[in-house]
Amino acid sequence: MKKGIYVVIAFFSLGLLQMNAQVIQGTSSSSSDMRFGVKGGLNLATLGGSTNLGTYSSKPGFHLGAVLEIPFSDTIIIQPEALVSLQGTGGYVTNENLNLWYVNVPVMAKYNVWEDLSIEAGPYLGVLLGENTEDQFSGLTNFETNTIDFGLAAGAGYRLDDNFYFQLRFNAGFINALKDVNSKNRVFQVSAVYFL
């Protein structure tokens, strides 16, 4: 039931972003307006820390969602996002991947270093949608996951043209993904954004 509520909240948030973008597009076409975009890319995820149960290794995943650019000046932009993200770790305890599905909502501050290159940093909040801990830990101990993740993200971006923007980012979580186990999310992301 909880997971269904989270999915509804995620889709509702994306719908609000889309509605906001349509209103903005109808008011003006100036380059200083807010802009809506879609985003997708690859994750290289693991869990940070050490544990007696085994070692963490990297696993591939992906992310997909929506972004909104809110310019404050020619050099400073705030970019909230709503992303579905496959994270976790590879080969933990068993030889199978530990899959953690999140809806992440980062709010990034972007600073344009040059005309097309920017650096970015900001906090993110994640809500766990699903996981496969029962498959991973069956017969061992009852492992529980935290439903909330919070952390910081930092990276850089390159604007190819008015529509395409590419990002490289690292997300570092502050909350253990698995309760009572040192297991903070660590995710490298390579993304492409298409602004409408």
Image: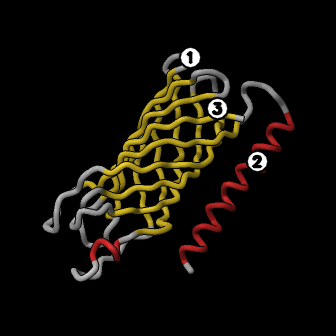
Q: Residue furthest left?
A: 52
Task: Name the residue tied to disc 3.
Answer: 72
Q: Residue furthest front?
A: 95
Residue 158's label in the rendered image is none
As measured in the structure, the alpha-carbon distance from the residue carrying label 2 to the one carrying label 3 is 17 Å
As measured in the structure, the alpha-carbon distance from the residue carrying label 2 to the one carrying label 1 is 26 Å
Question: Does label 2 or label 3 sit earlier along the sequence?
Answer: 2
- Does dot 1 land on a helix, a strand or a loop? loop
Along the line of sight, the residue nearer the viewer: 93 or 178? 93
Name the amino acid, label 2.
Answer: Asn
Residue drawn where x is 57% and y is 24% of the image? 159
Residue drawn where x is 70% and y is 50% of the image? 17
- The quarter of the image holding the C terminus is top right
Place of residue 118 in the rendered image (x, y in percent of width and height, measured from the top left): 50, 26
Along the line of sight, the residue nearer the viewer: 124 or 169? 169
As measured in the structure, the alpha-carbon distance from the residue carrying label 3 to the one carrying label 1 is 15 Å
| Residue 116 position by quadrant | top right
Place of residue 160 in the rendered image (x, y in percent of width and height, measured from the top left): 58, 21
Question: Does label 2 or label 1 sit earlier along the sequence?
Answer: 2
